[in-house]
């Protein structure tokens, strides 16, 4: 038997009142694979994301992460298992500096519990190590010089990078990126594509990506899943999807 | 940042201070001291965690009555009552956090917690057998391991020691990953959860820890005034406590200390009339919101880096 | 025991009408500005004091005193919004809530400086009488309160539904940005609604001071009952505020009589806690909880 896939989504259904946002979607994601979710607004992409990250509890279906059922777990539990996400608009903590944002990402790895704190078991060493690692990552991504600036005062592109650094800091196994290219300049987009590819190839991270910037999708994704009205209408390599009539219909609203 | 350590000299400098003060001034000084823990707990929830909880006076009153009743009716020594006062205060804090856990925020949370605090006041009024009702109850003279705390001067040293301890612990808490997590929750709760922070647990933690510290402040209040009445825990008291954290600076530990001193001492400068406290605290808060929204601590932080706190943005 | 039920219902509805008026006045401010006025109760109390001062102090006839008080409280509400709240609109919710609370307390402090903690029993402008219907007693107070509140409700309903001004108000309730786009001066509208809400509440305060002793603490009681009525009916719903107020009056009387008199005092505190925990949207309104 081969290892279970990194992420296995089976017949997921999410309803909001009478509205069916996701209607029985299934797919799999392997470690080191980059999979893009595309589709028109309201197709259920972000809802599907929210179900995987624990922000929404699915009404039916199963979500397995490394073979373990995670549907219904809370976001922080899923996060602790190694599934991290970024947010469509502003997932940062604007009052915290870039460095502190990354340190929040490392929260679980830093130091002792509440009682340990009160009774003196020092967590200083873990904090110092985490700070060093956070700085290193920020430099690696080319934004080390922004470490002490408040995240809320950074440009859109810089905020994106901080958010990605923050998601990476814990060496996640699964990364959910919700429209990471929004507001980025063309150069920054290319940079982002390189980062995403490196993560998958060298660190074996499984990446699920929601993106409207079609050229980014085509250049980084190994596979593209197309959603329309809560259903999966295609699941294929980018070049096949590009040629698919049904996809064009879903995406452009006409044949 | 080790320069900050010079602040620990402050209590030593304060040691001889009451010797120059008359008895009334000593009493005022003690009141300022006991409002430091009261402000600390309040600021933790409102300033650091950013939740609109108006139930601080409930923990304060519970701490005071638990300590007073245990001393008066069960002959428990004062220093032992600190523990149940903290526990009950903390439990009340945890209870007050329930609506927040259920997703109630903003004005709704403010209204619910305000109602909770007022219900506690009615409990003191109605539970006459324990509290003496509206007429109040006398608190016996406390002693600490045989040392009678019958003067303001003696109480000063006990209060100072307690306050230094609570400030030290809170300082440690706020500079740790907990302080950072509180600020993350305040800034963006959903993202905080996505970073692996169990937000619900941290909200309960802040409320309960805050309630416990405020409960200790209540026990200090009980022996400082020597007589407990329910009016001490009404909405004017809530306003005073709001004035402390807002004048000092929301989310700032230094600010809480400054606020406790200013809000306690400032009204003493004038002759007090009925209604005077409400007027002074009301005007203080209005002026601070309009002209110094981050409180006095922000002026200090701008004046010298030694006053910069790790997770307070002045 | 049950023979007293009709009587309890009647007095419950009568006080409930007053709560309804106060909750309605708070809802007007809330819907217009999305700020909950934690100082509203004290403004309501100030209205009662103003009538007392104009009437007894200056010797003016009651109706003149009432009209002056309404104008004065409109000005207070208008100026409060303009000078103290408008500068911090868009700031943290805490600042807005605290600003309103602090204004209320400052006002209460002024009232207490002048009147201390003495209790005033203002004279009614009419003769108090009681009418028997079977075993139900209806007082002139009941008739006057219900009559005036119903009259105000009809006037407000017509104002909102059938006048051009009402359409503008409704539209601005729905969308502030849309209103700004079609040329409505939104800050001025906010100040106007604060003034209107405060004046409306002041009328409630005047009637309240006829049936309850007037002290500077009246504002606190009023605020709590207003909140309770608003949460019961659904925060932000105008109709809900009215129904919530009447229900609150009835619940208070029933619990107070059949369970324990203490409930007359604490129902106002219990209602928001119970309602927001069990059914955050109230009986009629939208959801109160901001789920994360």
Image (cartoon, helix red, strand yellow):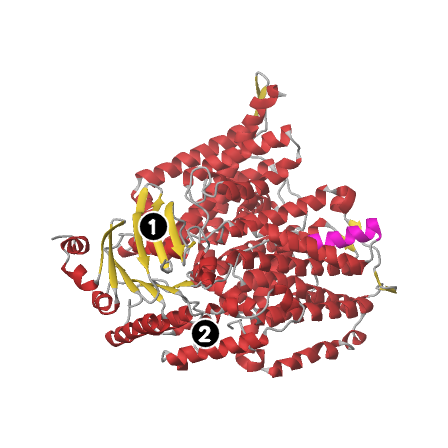
Residue name at image x 76 percent, y 42 percent? B128
Q: Hey, which residue is sitting farthest left in the picture? A: A255
Q: Residues within 10 Å of mark 2 (few under 14, many from 20)?
A: many
In the rendered view, would you say C242 is above or below C108?
Answer: above
Q: Is residue A30 left or right of residue B39?
A: left
Say which quarter of the image contains residue A142: bottom left
Position of residue A129 measured from the top left corner of the image (x, y, whole percent): 52, 77
In the rendered view, would you say A81 is above or below B122?
Answer: below
Q: CA distance from mark 2 to mark 1?
A: 39 Å
- B313 or C162: nearer the viewer: B313
Magenta-span inclusion, residue B72: yes
Kindly identify which residue carries mark 2. A97
User: Mark 2 or mark 1, which has the lower sequence index?
Assistant: 1
> Which residues are the magenta region?
B62-75
Q: Hey, which residue is sitting farthest right in the picture? A: B146
Q: In this orientation, does residue B232 appear? A: no
Q: Chain of mark 2?
A: A
Q: Hey, which residue is sitting farthest front in the picture? A: A1
Residue name at image x 45 percent, y 57 percent? A75
């Amino acid at each position: 038997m081969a290892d279970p896939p990194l992420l296995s989504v089976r017949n997921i259904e999410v309803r909001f009142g009478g509205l069916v946002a996701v209607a029985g979607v299934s797919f799999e994601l392997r470690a080191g694979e980059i999979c893009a979710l595309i589709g028109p607004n309201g197709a259920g992409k972000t809802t599907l994301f929210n179900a995987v990250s624990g922000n929404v509890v699915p009404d039916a279906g199963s979500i397995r992460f490394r073979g373990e059922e995670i549907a219904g777990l809370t976001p922080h539990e899923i996060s602790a298992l190694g599934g991290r996400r970024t947010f469509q608009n502003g997932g940062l903590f604007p009052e915290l500096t870039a460095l502190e944002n990354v340190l929040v990402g490392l929260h679980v790895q830093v130091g002792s519990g509440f009682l340990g704190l009160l009774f003196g078991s020092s967590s200083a060493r873990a904090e110092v190590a985490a700070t060093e690692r956070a700085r290193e990552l920020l430099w690696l991504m080319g934004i080390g010089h922004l470490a002490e600036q408040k995240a809320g005062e950074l440009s859109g592109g810089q905020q994106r990078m901080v958010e990605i650094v923050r998601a990476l800091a814990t060496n996640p196994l699964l990364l959910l990126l919700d429209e990471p290219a929004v507001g980025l300049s063309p150069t920054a987009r290319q940079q982002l594509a390189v980062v995403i590819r490196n993560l998958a190839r060298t660190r074996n991270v499984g990446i699920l990506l929601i993106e409207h910037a079609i050229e980014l999708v085509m250049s980084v994704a190994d596979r593209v899943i197309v959603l329309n009205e809560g259903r999966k209408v295609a699941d294929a390599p980018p070049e096949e999807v590009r040629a698919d009539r049904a996809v064009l219909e879903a995406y452009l609203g006409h044949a | 940042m080790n320069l900050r350590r010079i602040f620990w000299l402050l209590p030593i400098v304060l040691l001889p201070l009451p010797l120059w003060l008359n008895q009334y001034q000593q009493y005022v000084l003690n009141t300022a001291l006991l409002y430091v823990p009261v402000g600390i707990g309040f600021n933790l929830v409102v300033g650091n965690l950013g939740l609109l909880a108006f139930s601080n006076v409930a923990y304060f009153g519970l701490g005071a009555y638990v300590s007073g009743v245990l001393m008066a009716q069960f002959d428990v020594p004062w220093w032992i009552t600190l523990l149940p006062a903290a526990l009950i205060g903390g439990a009340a804090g945890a209870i007050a956090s329930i609506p927040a856990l259920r997703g109630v925020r903003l004005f709704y949370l403010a209204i619910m917690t305000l109602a909770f605090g007022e219900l506690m006041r009615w409990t003191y009024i109605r539970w006459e057998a324990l509290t003496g009702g509206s007429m109040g109850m006398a608190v016996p003279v406390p002693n600490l391991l045989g040392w009678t705390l019958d003067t303001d001067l003696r109480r000063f040293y006990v209060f100072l020691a307690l306050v230094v301890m609570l400030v030290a612990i809170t300082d440690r808490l706020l500079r740790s990953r907990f302080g950072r997590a509180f600020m993350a929750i305040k800034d963006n709760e959903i993202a905080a959860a996505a970073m692996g922070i169990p937000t619900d647990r941290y909200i309960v933690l802040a409320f309960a820890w805050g309630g416990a510290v405020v409960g200790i402040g209540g026990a200090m209040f009980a022996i400082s005034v020597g007589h407990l009445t329910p009016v001490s825990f009404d909405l004017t008291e809530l306003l005073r406590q709001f004035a402390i954290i807002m004048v000092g600076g929301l989310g700032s530990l230094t600010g809480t200390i400054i606020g406790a001193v200013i809000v306690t001492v400032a009204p003493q400068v004038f002759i007090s009339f009925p209604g005077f406290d409400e007027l002074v605290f009301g005007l203080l808060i209005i002026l601070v919101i309009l002209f110094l929204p981050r409180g006095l601590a922000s002026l200090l932080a701008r004046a010298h880096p030694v006053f910069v706190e790790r997770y307070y943005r002045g | 025991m049950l023979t007293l039920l009709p009587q309890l219902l009647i007095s419950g509805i009568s006080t409930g009408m007053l709560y309804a008026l106060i909750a309605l006045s708070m809802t007007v401010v809330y819907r217009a500005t999305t700020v909950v006025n934690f100082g509203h109760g004290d403004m309501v109390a100030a209205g009662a004091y103003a009538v007392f001062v104009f009437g007894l102090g200056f010797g003016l006839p009651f109706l003149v005193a009432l009209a002056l008080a309404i104008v004065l409280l409109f000005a207070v509400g208008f100026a409060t919004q303009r000078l103290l709240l408008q500068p911090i609109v868009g700031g943290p919710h805490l600042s807005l809530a605290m600003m309103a609370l602090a204004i209320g307390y400052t006002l209460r402090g002024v009232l207490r400086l002048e009147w201390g903690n003495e209790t005033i029993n203002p004279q009614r402008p009419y003769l108090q009488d009681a009418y028997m219907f079977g075993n139900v007693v209806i007082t002139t107070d009941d008739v006057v309160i219900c009559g005036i509140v119903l009259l105000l409700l009809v006037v407000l309903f017509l104002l909102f539904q059938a006048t051009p001004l009402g359409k503008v108000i409704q539209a601005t309730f729905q969308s502030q940005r849309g209103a700004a786009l079609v040329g409505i001066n939104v800050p001025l509208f906010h100040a106007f609604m604060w003034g209107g809400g405060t004046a409306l509440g002041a009328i409630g305060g005047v009637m309240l001071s006829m049936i309850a002793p007037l002290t500077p603490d009246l504002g606190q009681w009023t605020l709590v009952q207003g909140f309770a009525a608003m949460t019961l009916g659904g925060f932000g719903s105008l109709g809900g505020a009215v129904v919530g107020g009447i229900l609150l009056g009835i619940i208070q009387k029933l619990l107070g009589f059949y369970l324990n008199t203490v409930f007359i005092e604490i129902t106002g505190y219990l209602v928001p806690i119970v309602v927001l925990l069990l059914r955050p949207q109230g009986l009629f309104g939208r959801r109160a909880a901001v789920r994360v």
